[in-house]
Image (spheres, coloured by chain):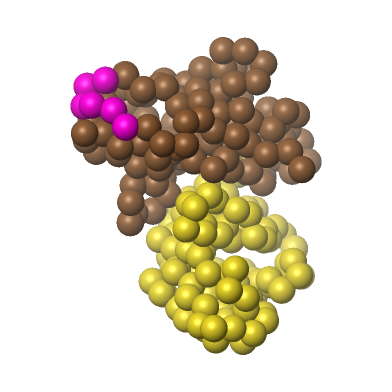
Amino acid sequence: AQTVTQSQPEMSVQEAETVTLSCTYDTSESDYYLFWYKQPPSRQMILVIRQEAYKQQNATENRFSVNFQKAAKSFSLKISDSQLGDAAMYFCAYLTMGSNYQLIWGAGTKLIIKP
Amino acid sequence: EPEVTQTPSHQVTQMGQEVILRCVPISNHLYFYWYRQILGQKVEFLVSFYNNEISEKSEIFDDQFSVERPDGSNFTLKIRSTKLEDSAMYFCASSPRGWGVETQYFGPGTRLLVL
């Protein structure tokens, strides 16, 4: 069975600085998707970025980028120019493929932005 | 931009009572999901639904749970006889068929408290 591990329960960063959140996963599948979701205090789950496993190029969305290392089964999120609005829980998630689509979630990392 | 909506935002109920959580997925989406997040724990998959039937369900989704698409827009989760441990945030999500099926868009959640 697939598992997702986020080893950093909490991270803090100074506003305008760069921070990297770690995520590792375990799978025997070769084709899958990985996601980072953001959950602010409102607790809504907001999609930040996604990565297709078959693509070698790392996904980028404005200030958010990933470092996808397929062989190492690592999927880290880099947030550049951190802003106060980035403060939230960040969840890494793995999507099982095949006939059914099911997200498997990490435990989350709480990101604190220091003004 | 289309959004997944959920009602109510908060629900307080007595143990043993039935609750129905409602979701309106994005209009052209055909895959629907329910997840739950107990406070301080990982997000957990409950069930996926496609073509008017359950595609996949987790061990959590026992006989106390049921899902329904009563009309062309709503997707509901029913808990027949709530337990204290059902207290959680319940998220509905949807994804389109075909291109983009791998990306699930989440509603704002319903916070369920069972007393």
Q: Quadrant of residue A76?
A: bottom right
Q: Quadrant of the C terminus of chain A?
A: bottom right
What x and y, as percent, mark residue A80?
67, 80
Q: Main secondary structure of the magenta part?
A: loop
Pick the residue in front: A73 or B61: B61
Pick the residue in front: B104 or B98: B104
Eyeballing the image, is B45 above or below B41? above
Pick the residue in front: B53 or B84: B84
What x and y, as percent, mark residue B85?
24, 38
Residue B96: say if magenta: no
Eyeballing the image, is A39 above or below B33? below
Chain B: drawing colour: brown
Seen at 58% across and 74% down, the residue is: A84
What x and y, as percent, mark residue B11?
37, 32
Kindly indicate which chain is depicted in yellow in the rendered structure.
A
Write the start and end of the magenta stretch as one range: B12-17
Total labels drawn: 0
Whether residue B51 is visible here, answered yes or no, is yes
Eyeballing the image, is B37 above or below A100? below
Q: Quadrant of residue A110?
A: bottom left
Residue B16: say if magenta: yes
Query: In the displayed structure, does residue B16 sit left or right of residue B102?
Result: left
Q: Quadrant of residue A68?
A: bottom right
